[in-house]
Amino acid sequence: MPGAAFFSSGCAGRYSTLEPAGPAADAIASLWWVMLAGAVAILVLVCALLALAFRRGSLERPTSTKRWIIGGGLIFPSVVLVALLAYGLVIGERLVPRNDAQALRVVAEASRWQWTFTQPGRTGGVVTQDVLNIPAGRPVDIELRTLDVIHAFWVPRLAGKMDAIPGHRNVLRIEANVPGVYHGLCAEFCGPGHTGHAFRVVAHDPAGWARFVAGEGQ
Ligand SMILES: [Cu+2]
């Protein structure tokens, strides 16, 4: 359908959260779709009620007005908000790194206007600039640091965003389902070079990852 293609074309792209490629990004995209569906349902309901009110002129009995105010103004929003809060908490919990031996730990150091990634290699720390190498299908915990101002680490197709704050260590878990190149950017205005404060995440297949760890991927 050309119409569907037109509307969905806006959802694709290197920075699209609606084209998730990892578990955390999947959870965030699901939350987005649930909220969109809920918002559309509520909009339709309100429009229908409005049309009904115009057609009928005024509600006949004061008791039905009271019922609408209590049901539609108190009970309905309370139920929706509590459900959204519970759903958001469950999903949010999935984004927090847990202690597991499987996860790879990488230090990401932001500065104006570079990203320096340090990760364990065979003979010591492997340092890369503006390119983060990870194995596909394995969780990676990014320890965020900054050398100057506040920056934010964001790879929209892999996970949510998190700030790098001076004097503070934040940890964000990312994971790529399949090998590929994913684009990341700084999501916190950090000065005149902010627009170019971007990086790439290269998710390797097992052979590529072995080559990178052995030092040949440099
Ligand atoms: Cu920045």
Image (spheres, grey):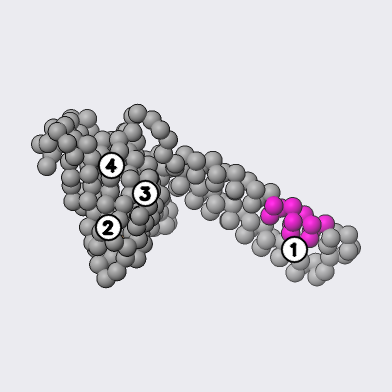
Marks 3 & 1, CB-CB < 8 Å contact: no
Q: Who comes first in sequence, dot 2 or dot 3?
A: 2
- Could you give the CA–CA distance between mark 2 and mark 1, rounded to whole angstroms? 60 Å
The response on whether ligand 1 sits within 8 Å of label 3 is no
- Residue 110, how many percent across, how many down? 27, 55
> Which residue has dot 1 on it?
52
Assign the C terminus to one quadrant of the image: top left
Name the mark on residue 106: 4
| Residue plotted at (72% across, 61% down) | 49
| In this rendering, the label closer to the viewer, 4 or 2 | 2
Disc 3 marks which amino acid? Arg
Report whether 76 appears left or right of 84: right
> Which residue has dot 2 on it?
147
Disc 4 marks which amino acid? Val
Q: Give the tally of numbered discs.
A: 4
Disc 2 is placed on an element classified as loop
Q: Who comes first in sequence, dot 4 or dot 3?
A: 4
Tell me: residue 209, above or below residue 198: above
